[in-house]
Image (spheres, helix red, strand yellow):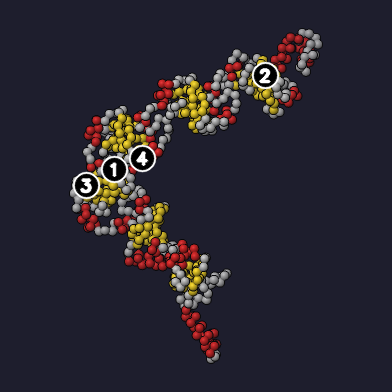
Amino acid sequence: MELEIYSQNSSPAAEEFKSLLKTQFSKNKNLEEGNIIECKVTKITNNYVYLSSDGLKQEPILDINQLKSIGLFDKIKEGSKISVLLEKLEHPKTGEIIVSAEKALKLEGWNKIVELHKKEEPVMGRILRKCKGGAEVSIDELNLLAFLPGSMISDTPLKNFDHLIGEPQKFAIVKLDMQRGNVVVSRKHIISSFKEADKKKIIEGYKIGDVVSGETKGFSSFGAFFRLDNGLDVLCHTSELSYSRVNHPDEILSIGDRKELKVISIDLTKLQLGTSLKQMGPNPFDNIDKYEIGKTYKIKIIKIADFGAFGNLEDGLTVLLHQSELSWTKKNPSPKKMFSVGQEISVVIKEIDKEQKRVAVSYKMTLENPFETFEKKYKVGDIVDSKVVSKNEYSLFVKIADLDLEAFLHQNNLTYLNDSEEELKKYKVGDKIKVKILEAKIDEQKIRVGLREASGPDPIEFFNDKNINDRITCKVISTDKKKGLLVKPVGCEMEFTIKKSSIAMNASDARPERWTGGESVDVCIAEKDLGRRKIVLSIKLLEEIEKKEALEKYGAEEGSGKQLPFSSLSEDLKKKDKEKK
C-alpha cells in the first residue's frame, strides 16, 4: 500500500526512497530467524566483536569468549567474513539482533554429518572419556560430540580401553537422531570393515606351530586378546597363558605387553586363530620335583595386585606371593609399596600342588619372625622399653624394644590413680615408656602390656588386709557441693570420692562445705571388691556403727547419751529402756 502511495509521487526524493525500500525488502528475504548468514567483522574490542551484513538494520555483536571457546577468535580480524546463526531479528526487550557463531558451527557440522551418513562415509574423531554404557567421542572437524556404545568399541571384548582414549581414529556413523541432535558412532564397524575374503586370505597364510608377535589389547574371563603386527586380533585362552594356574589374565599380563605366541589352532569358518603363550617354553612342572617346600629361592616380580604379587620362579613357572605372606606384623601390607615389577626377591616355597599346577611362596619366611624372637628374649612379667607408634580412642600400640612388632596397651592399664580416658590423652606417637608384659599369645601374634603395672605395686593392695566396716583415716583433698568429698586414705596413693549421701546420717549435716580441704576425717569401708578395683568409703556408715555401739554400751544407764554427739541417741535410749520393761 505504501508503495502505491509513493508511486504516485513523482518527486526525485520519493523515487530514491522507493528504490531504497525495494532493495531493503529484497535483502530481507534471506534474513529469516534460524538461517545461517555471512557477516563481516567491522570492529574488535576487548570484549566484543561487531559485525555487519547487508539488510540488517543494526550491527550484531558477538562475545569474544564464545569465539575463543570454539577456536575462531585467532582466525578473525577486521574485514574477515564469519558465518553466524540468526537467532532473533529483534530481541523483545532490548531490540538487539541476536546471532551465534557457535550454533552456526554446530549446525554446519550437523548438516555435514547428515551428508556423510547418507553416503555411508566414516568420520575422524577422538574418544574423550568413558561414560555410562560406552564412551564420549569428539568429532573435532565438525565441532560435534557423539556417543560410542560399549558394544561398538571393538570387534573383540575389551575389559579396558584406556589405551584408545585421545587417539585420532575413524568411526562409522550408525545412527542420527534429528530431533535430539544425537550422533551414535561405531569403531567396531571400521575394524570389521575389511572383507572376510581378505581376512581369510591372511589366516590361510598361517600354519600350526607358527610363532607370531603381538601386543596385549584386552582381557576377558576366558583369555587375553592380542593384536598382531598385521592388525589381526587373536585369542590366547586362559589355560594357554601359563603352565601355572591363572584365574584371570590380568594376574600375569598388562595392557600393552608385547609377547611371542605359538599358533595352536586355525578356524577358517570362524576366521579365528588360537594361540598359546605357555607353549613358547617347556613345561616347568615336568621338573617341579627339583624344588623343595621350605627352601629359599629367587623370583622375579612380573605383576603386582592389591592382594599380592606374581613372580617367575623360572620361565613359564609363575608363583603367587599372597599379601598375607608379606609381613609377620602388618595386617594389610601394600605389595605396591614393597615391590616393583622386575625386582628380584628371595622367597620360601610354602606349597606345591602338581594337580592344580600351583606354587605358593612366602616372603616373610625369609625374614626373622619377631614373635619368635620375643618369645626367646622375654616372658610375662618382664618390664621392657617401648615406643608409642599409634593410638586410637581407647588404647595405645607400642613397639617393643628393638623388635618389629606392636603390643596392645589398653587405657585401663595406663594408671592406677587417674581417670583412664584423661590419662590416654597425655600420650602421643613417639613417646618412650616402660611397660610390663601382661599376656603373650605367640600363636595368635598378640601381646598385651601395661604401663601402670610397670610403675610399682598396685595401691589397691592397701586394702588387702582391711574389711568392710573397718575404720580408716583419710585426708580431705577437696570438696564439691554436688559430688561430695574427695579424700585420700593415709598411707595410700589412691583418691576416692565420698558421695554427698554418704557424708552424714542427718541430712542437714550432709554438707561437703563443712570441710575446706586438708582436714583429717575418719571413715568406714562400705564396699570392697578388689577384683573390680572397687572401694566405697562412707562417713555416714561410721556414724551408724558408732551409734549402734553406744546404744549397746549405754543403754542400761538412765540419762545416758545426753552428752553424746548424736542428736537422736537420747530418744533412742529411752525407747530401748521402755522395751526392756
Say if 374 sits above or below 252 in the image: above
Which residue is farthest bottom? 10
Q: Quickly name the residue at label 4.
A: 340
Q: Quickly name the residue at label 3.
A: 211
Q: Amino acid at mark 3?
A: Val
Instruction: Assign a secondary structure to mark 3.
Output: strand
Q: Which mark is residue 182?
A: none
Whether residue 240 sits left or right of residue 327 in the image: it is left
Residue 98 appears anywhere in the view = no
**Cα distance between the residues tagged 4 and 3:** 30 Å
Instruction: Assign a secondary structure to mark 1.
Output: helix
Q: Residue at x 53, y 90 (%)?
A: 12
Q: Residue at x 42, y 32 (%)?
A: 330
Q: Nearer the viewer, mark 4 or mark 2?
A: 4
Place of residue 169 in the rendered image (x, y in percent of width and height, measured from the top left): 34, 58
Q: Earlier in the sequence, mark 3 or mark 2?
A: 3
Place of residue 46 in the rendered image (x, y in percent of width and height, measured from the top left): 52, 65
Whether residue 499 sits left or right of residue 42 in the image: it is right
**Cα distance between the residues tagged 4 and 1:** 24 Å
